[in-house]
Image (spheres, rainbow, N blue to C red):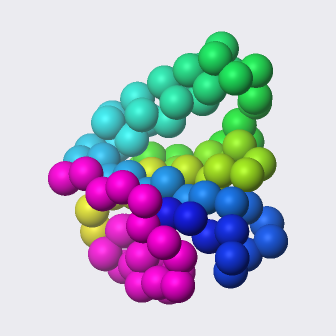
């Protein structure tokens, strides 16, 4: 989601749903490692899979990894509806 026009703390949000705690942890671990290796950027991670929301801040890009119920509860797509969706995969 492109939020450059509506936020000054980041340019993009990436929203992702994992179906289990194990999947959320694996997604977070692989993402942090891949970005570190490929782009030399260290992400700052907040939250744990057991809480249903892991946030990884890469500066201009903030990644939100949700459990299905937490994604439905927080509804970031609605909260940031003025942002432009660049890609949606299901």
Residue 66, quarter of picture: bottom left
Instruction: Classify 6 as above or below 70.
Output: below
Residue 74 is left or right of residue 29, and the answer is left
Residue 7: % across, % down: 73, 75
| Position of residue 34 measured from the top left corner of the image (x, y, whole percent) | 56, 20
Q: Nearer the viewer, residue 56 or 87?
A: 87
Indicate the position of residue 83 as horizontal and vertical percent values. Answer: 53, 76
Q: Please tell me which residue is depicted at 52% across the width and 85% down the height of the picture.
A: 82
| Residue 45 rendering spot, x and y as whole percentages | 66, 43
**Rendered residue at 75%/30% (across/down):** 42
Q: Quadrant location of residue 43?
A: top right
Q: Is residue 64 visible?
A: no
Horizontally, residue 48 falls left or right of residue 6, namely: left
Q: Is residue 10 above or below residue 23?
A: below
Nearer to us in this view, 21 or 61: 61
Q: Residue at x 68, y 80 (%)?
A: 6
Residue interval drawn in magenta: 70-90
Is 84 inside the magenta-drawn segment?
yes
Tell me if residue 86 can be seen: yes
Q: Is residue 59 magenta?
A: no
Residue in the picture at 65% in, 50% down = 61
Q: Give the total of numbered labels.
A: 0
């Amino acid at each position: 989601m492109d939020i450059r026009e509506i936020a000054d703390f980041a340019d993009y949000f990436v929203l992702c749903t994992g179906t289990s705690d194990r999947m959320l942890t694996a997604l977070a671990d692989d993402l942090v490692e891949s970005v570190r290796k490929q782009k030399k950027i260290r992400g700052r991670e907040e939250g744990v899979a057991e809480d249903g929301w892991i946030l990884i801040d890469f500066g201009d890009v903030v990644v939100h990894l949700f459990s299905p119920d937490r994604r439905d509860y927080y509804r970031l797509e609605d909260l940031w509806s003025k942002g432009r969706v660049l890609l949606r995969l299901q």
